[in-house]
Amino acid sequence: MIRITVCKFGEIDIELDYQNAPNTAANFAELARNHFYDGLTFHRIIKGFMIQGGDPRGNGTGGADYNIRGEFKLNGFDNKISHKRGVISMARAMDFDSASSQFFIMHKDGEYLDNQYAAFGKVIKGMDIVDRIANVKTDRFDRPLEKVVIEKIETIGEEPRNVEKIK
């Protein structure tokens, strides 16, 4: 399990799905164990769609110093997770194998993302926190007017470790 602690908002508990997206889940857990996410923000918030974080630059252009393979159908993976409310998924650029550290949590259902993005878990506690974050005021570029800071993301219990990275 993963716990996301968001300053002034509370905790979101995530159950990772190692069956449908083993490398993506392991990558997220590894970044959490290495404190990569601590102090970063939810930099893109679209009420009725999703909240996005995990960019060390805070503007949607950054990530870890490597990429991982996109575990979704259009990229040859049989990922059966649907992008329903509460699902966590990896953000990416146009390249199917460009995911790194940025992730998003679905505020509402968005099944049109299925087969195109690597969903890798779901919120099991704290959807009220996701709702509160989704309701913050944003500018016309979907950036929150006040920073929504991830205090820390931590693993609770033991999570698998083998991550296949692409340089």
Image (cartoon, helix red, strand yellow):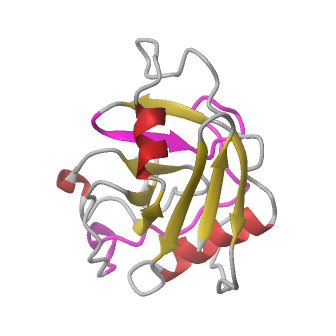
Q: Quadrant of the N terminus?
A: bottom right
Residue 77: x and y, percent? 34, 79
Residue 11: x and y, percent? 60, 52
Lateral position of residue 98 relative to residue 96, left or right: right
Lateral position of residue 16 relative to residue 9, left or right: left
The image quarter containing residue 21 is bottom left
State the residue in front, 18 or 7: 7
State the residue in front, 128 or 107: 128
The image quarter containing residue 101 is bottom right
Q: Is residue 147 above or below residue 61?
A: above
Name the residue rendered at 61%, 68% in the picture. 2
Tell me which secondary structure the magenta stretch mostly adopts. loop
> Would you say residue 65 sits in the magenta stretch?
yes
Name the residue rendered at 77%, 68% in the picture. 33
Outermost residue to the right: 34
Q: Quadrant of the C terminus?
A: bottom right
Lateral position of residue 2 relative to residue 144, left or right: right
Identify the magenta region: 48-77
Name the residue rendered at 33%, 70% in the picture. 72
